[in-house]
Amino acid sequence: MRRTWLLGLALCAAAPAVTAQAPQLPSHLYLSYSKVNYAELAQWTSDLFEHHKPILDSLRADGTIRGWRAWMHHTGGEYNVVLSIASDDWISLDTFWAEYLGRLEAQAPEAMNRMMGMAEGHFDEIWDVAEAHWAPDAASNYRYDARYQIGFDDIPAWEAFWADAAAPVLGELMEEGLLTGWVRLNHNTGGRYNWQVVFLFDEWDDMDDFAARFEAALFANAEAYERVARNILAHDDVLWRAVPAPAEN
């Protein structure tokens, strides 16, 4: 229980995403969601930048994890903060938790206990990284999660449609600068959905142009789309924005 709750503690510190054009994809993406009392969110954010970020940055720098990034809720979904942790393997995740929680307890026990009391709800998911594309040095200030529940027998047909209709236009949109990156994820542990794609954007206004172009590509072959869309059992979209550092007085 302690490990589960503490996973939600590093939710509001902004840090660089996993770097673009990495020679090898991270194997897992650990997504930790929390519902934080809005009246306490400023204190939570301040504690995270002061106490958690140095530890997380250090664990990224020494290779324990591949990267981390924190996001704040904008539109959709139940939770208002999420932490993404990219890892190469399960052993690295175990090492990460041992080091992270051990250092945090030793260096900032009061901040740790204070933050544990701020979360009104929490859950974790683990996803396997199937495909990822990042634009070098992109800011990626906004994140759009499209999550699906698809019958397991129907996933191959869905992924074939995605490869034919979606992936090519995503490459074009990245070249044009409307999209800074996208990541396709397969479910591993936790949550309702079993297939997800994450879209990354630099500017808010880019999302409208992206949506028009992307939807046109998906629906260009209406018959093919309708055939695979019947296999979607559930779907939702959630929009996040990167958490800024606390303002200096």
Image: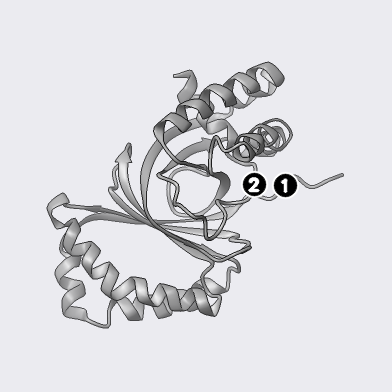
Q: Which picture quadrant has residue 191?
A: top left
**Total tally of numbered discs in the picture:** 2
Q: Position of residue 85 (x, y in %)?
A: 50, 41
Disc 1 and disc 2 in contact, CB within 8 angstroms: yes
Could one spot residue 22 in this view of the protein?
A: yes
Residue at 49% in and 19% down: 2
Residue at 44% in and 51% down: 25
In the rendered view, does 217 fall on the left or right side of 150? right
Q: Position of residue 148 (x, y in %)?
A: 29, 55
Q: Which picture quadrant has residue 141?
A: bottom right
Which quarter of the rendering shows the N terminus?
top left
Q: Which picture quadrant has residue 225?
A: bottom left
Q: Position of residue 165 (x, y in %)?
A: 29, 75
Point out which mark residue 221 bears: none
| In the depicted structure, whether residue 214 falls above or below residue 105 | below
Type of amino acid under label 2? Ala
Could one spot residue 117 in this view of the protein?
A: no
Residue at 47% in and 42% down: 79
Gap in angstroms between the C-alphas marked 1 and 2: 7 Å
In the rendered view, does 68 fall on the left or right side of 188? right
SS at circle 2? loop
Label 2 packing within 10 angstroms: few (<14), some (14-19), many (20+): many
Viewer-closest of 90 and 83? 90
Type of amino acid under label 1? Ala
Of marks 1 and 2, which one's residue comes earlier in the chain? 2
Point out which mark residue 245 bears: 1
SS at circle 1? loop
In the rendered view, does 18 fall on the left or right side of 40? left
Name, please, the residue furthest toward the front. 23
